[in-house]
Amino acid sequence: MSREIKSVDYGLEKIFEGAQDFLPLLGTDYVEMYVGNAKQAAHFYKTAFGFQSWAYKGLETGSKDTVSYVIKQDKIRLVLTTPLSSKNPINEHIVKHGDGVKVIALWVDDATKSWEETTARGAKSFMEPTVEKDAHGEVVRSGIYTYGETIHMFVERKNYSGIFLPGFEKWESDYNPEPVGLKYIDHMVGNVGWGQMNTWVKWYEDVMGFVNFLSFDDKQIHTEYSALMSKVMSNGNGRIKFPINEPAEGIKRSQIEEYLDFYEGSGVQHIAVATDDIIKTVSALRSRGVEFLSHPPQAYYDAVPGRLEEYSHKLREDIETLKSLGIMIDADDEGYLLQIFTKPVQDRPTLFFEIIQRMGARGFGAGNFKALFESIEREQAKRGTL
Ligand code: FE2
């Protein structure tokens, strides 16, 4: 499996030259989830994942329709939003999709130009460039639709010094569990319907100026029972990476199909967050009640030294510790990576998190796909959805 990644991983800089950085994107600004109960969701992400209270908008700040909690850990900002009455259109999103990611917000220098450039290239507008102001200055935001009902917001905040966005106030809480070492969003994966992967690959190329720098077909990503296809899209500076998955035919139901059935459409499958000490981070997450997929079998760990040797990389971590935590290891020419996947973080088997530590490798754990998917299939079997 690792050998297959090698054939496509030829000089990222060269590939990125193909990207047109007309936006350009400075990084992920925030990720907003629409949830049924933002207050409880915020408590969960603070307690279990070590996010910190950061900003708040609700009845007390003059927001009559919605309440939003902003929680933060290093560079990661999550916004949890719930409507306050049945009339708010956010309800429809929650009824249809359950809790899930609505907005992947991208930090830009010029939100007006970003909207103009992308809509001129075929993006469907979600929100025209809008200036929001308060005592701390102004923010310009604009938005476009991507797959499903998911949105990309462009956020221009160079003239703003407030805590988050106009309308938000600092959220002071007496309850502040320690962070677990999550640093930034490494990538966010979208699941799209049958035959739609290439449509969205082309959309990211044409509309956003991204390039497709890694591809995996169903011959590479399959188990005995199910399969999927995946293409990784990146912006010009490589800071934003969006793999796009679609289901492929197998003997049984692909995990992507299960997602599409329960999310009732395309949407964000997982958010991969980086740490520079995965052993410490995962130990903390486990002790705080975060549930991970079942451990890979012994045979998986038996094969790890050989995989690393193939690329002459030396594992710095103790393999027995990694094994006891269920952390997976993959290698490519440039280095290795350590990763682990949570179970879905809500009752529908939809959104989950990945914790990743990169030790030089820039791939996505292709060598782990089989072990990972077999683990997901064990969960699907329990749910009766395989
Ligand atoms: Fe991932």
Image: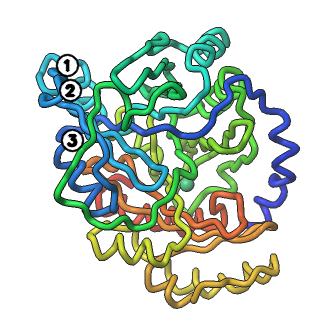
Measured in 3D between alpha carbons, the distance from the residue under mark 2 to the one under mark 1, in whole angstroms, is 8 Å
Query: Is there CB contact under 8 Å for labels 2 and 1?
Result: yes
Measured in 3D between alpha carbons, the distance from the residue under mark 3 to the one under mark 1, in whole angstroms, is 15 Å
Viewed as shown, does residue 291 lie left or right of 202? left
Say few, some or many: other residues with alpha carbon within 10 Å of mark 1 (under 14 / 14 to 19 / 20 or more): few
State the quadrant of the C terminus: bottom left
Foreground of the two, 270 or 228: 270
Residue 38 tag number: 3
Q: Residue at x 75, y 44 (%)?
A: 213
Q: Residue at x 43, y 14 (%)?
A: 131
Up-down relation of residue 332 to residue 141 (above or below): below
Q: Amino acid at mark 1?
A: Asn
Residue 66 tag number: 2
Q: Position of residue 136 (x, y in %)?
A: 38, 27
Q: Position of residue 274 (x, y in %)?
A: 53, 60
Up-down relation of residue 93 to residue 307 (above or below): above
In the picture of the structure, the residue carrying the numbered disc 1 is 88
Q: Amino acid at mark 3?
A: Ala
Where is residue 375, by image quadrant? bottom left
